[in-house]
Image (cartoon, helix red, strand yellow):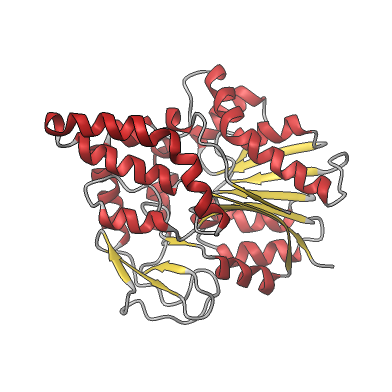
Amino acid sequence: MKRYSKPLGNLFAYKQDFFSKNAEKISEFKRIADIYINQPLRRNCKNCDARISPDLPNFVKRDVRYFFCNVCGHLNGANEDTSEFVRCLYTDNNGQQYATNYIEKDIEDFYSRMRDIYVPKAQFLKDSLLEYEQTLKGLSLCDFGAGAGYFVGANKEMGFTSVVGYEVSKALVRFGNHVLGGLLYQHELEETTEIVEKVEAEVISFIGVLEHTRELRSILDAIRKNPSIRYIFFSVPLFSPTVVLETVFTNIMPRHLVAGHTHLYTETSIDYFCKEFGFKKISEWWFGLDFADFYRSILVSLELQKSEVSVLVNYWKSQFAALIDDLQQVLDRNHLCSEVHMLVRKKD
């Protein structure tokens, strides 16, 4: 089962900072990059563990070196995702800084975000299981990196018998449990693999999470060894045209290959870990924000020139904003998009 594209919808409403706080975001991401490039050099591919040479990068972006693995095709940052680096991103100050990106001001806004962004993901998971002749009745789902519980809440509405989530940020768990009533559990970063090893759920999910984990291969191995787990649903960021845009538009805030995204998947690197760990693909949903990133890069660049180009700003908004979905579909259908969702099952 393959699906392509997703309407932009209200997404820009949740990303206004990308337009209005361009300079602030660039400054913050530079701070994170400075921490990252001072970590030890990576000696093994994040995805397949093959020996690599980070001294010979394929390209450099904002002082960070990147290279493709010659074995699996994964895009690696040249430095390690150390405990120090990961903690500064997600758990320092109880995860309060990271949580600001995902905590809404009230319950109504929580459910609006859940409906606009996470219910379509949960619906795709449900459709995929039904297409595979698997009903949700009797199935339990455990979401890792659950954040404030948006995907947990969305899947609760889909009809799973049991849904819970695990998250490292205390601030996000506190907020999510206030809304959902105790479906989230806080844990330490180092406990992730152990929880995956022992969790009793038929379906586990990682929505925008695998790229953030330090112990990626240990987690995948734990999934393989856990007899309770049957299905794995994940979304990961992909090497795509957005990376080129972010390299060209150096005065525009990068969205994709930045901060906690120190490495990106390719179709070949996904195929590699599925084969290595014994996962069979059931469904794929290819879509991205590459043309949205292009639109934003042009618009913000024009607005930085202020009144001298006001006519061009109005032209760009009026003529191209409505075309983003149509243009993005071309990339999506050719698997040249910035994201993919997949449901896989463990081979018998």
**Extreme left residue here?**
308
Indicate the quadrant containing the N terminus: top left, top right, bottom left or bottom right: bottom right
- Examine the rendered structure and indicate whether residue 153 appears above or below residue 46: above
| Residue 212 on image: x %, y % | 49, 54
Q: How many marks?
A: 0
Q: Is residue 221 left or right of residue 61?
A: right
Q: Is residue 60 above or below residue 341?
A: below
Q: Position of residue 57 (x, y in %)?
A: 32, 75
> Does the image show residue 252?
yes
Q: Quick check: 33 above or below 165? A: below
Residue 184 in view, yes or no: no
**In percent of the image, x 65 and y 57: which residue is there?**
194
The spot of residue 206 in percent (x, y) is 61, 50
Q: Residue at x 56, y 66 (%)?
A: 267
Residue 138 x %, y %: 88, 41
Q: Quadrant of the C terminus?
A: bottom right
Residue nearest the viewer, comparing 331 with 18: 331
Q: Quadrant of residue 115?
A: top right
Q: From the viewer's side, name the closer residue of 318 and 182.
A: 318
The image quadrant that residue 197 belongs to is bottom right
- Image point 67% across, 29% down: which residue? 182
Q: Residue at x 32, y 79 (%)?
A: 56
Front residue of this view, candidates 213 and 327: 327
Is 94 placed left or right of 7 in the picture? left
